Image (cartoon, rainbow, N blue to C red):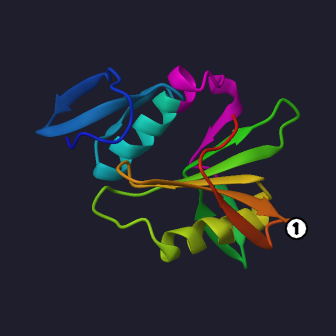
Amino acid sequence: MLKLNFPIFEFKLKIRDNKTFIFDILRKKFFILTPEEWVRQHVIHFLVLTKKISTTLIGIEKKIVINKMTKRFDLVVFNNNGKVILLIECKSPSIKVDHKVFNQAAIYNKELNSEYLMITNGLSHLYFRSFNNSKSYTFIKDFPL
């Protein structure tokens, strides 16, 4: 897989039926290694090993309902009171991190009301702070977690 713009982490991989699987330390099972999953697993390891965020404070691929449509966010980080403080949207490295990806995360955030957003394709990472209950955003250099 492609080298991403994260520290180097060790992953558990296995091959079954000519498909590569990667172990998810949050869900405690193996998943097919797609390019987006490669990015998601790097973000998880970055949060846990580099930012020292407890695995109990990270939510992964949960359903939310937006305008009567069921969607799934990639990752969120909760504070100790259970409030979402960081929403993360992961894309494949081949997908450009642009306004379309930002808009997707911002729409999810109307439901989640996170103070911070991160959008990444593993190569580029963009961070935003939300103001006025997700009605406006400011680009920031990093999230303060």
Query: Is residue 25 highlighted in magenta?
Result: no
Dot 1 corresponds to which residue? 132
Most extreme residue toward the left, as rendered?
18
Q: Which residues are magenta?
A: 47-62
Please name the amino acid that badge 1 sits on: Asn
Q: What residue is drawn where x is 71% and y is 52%?
A: 116
Give neighbour class at mark 1: few <14, some 14-19, many 20+ (Cα, 10 Å): few
Report x, y in % for residue 33: 28, 42
| In the rendered image, the vertical position of residue 67 relative to residue 36, given as above or below | below
Q: Nearer the viewer, residue 75 or 30?
A: 75
Q: What residue is drawn where x is 56% and y is 69%?
A: 102
13 on left or right of 39:
left
Q: What residue is drawn where x is 38% and y is 45%?
A: 39
Most extreme residue toward the front, as rendered?
141
107 on left or right of 45:
right
Q: What residue is drawn where x is 31% and y is 42%?
A: 4
**Total of numbered circles in the picture?**
1
Looking at the rendered structure, the secondary structure element under dot 1 is loop
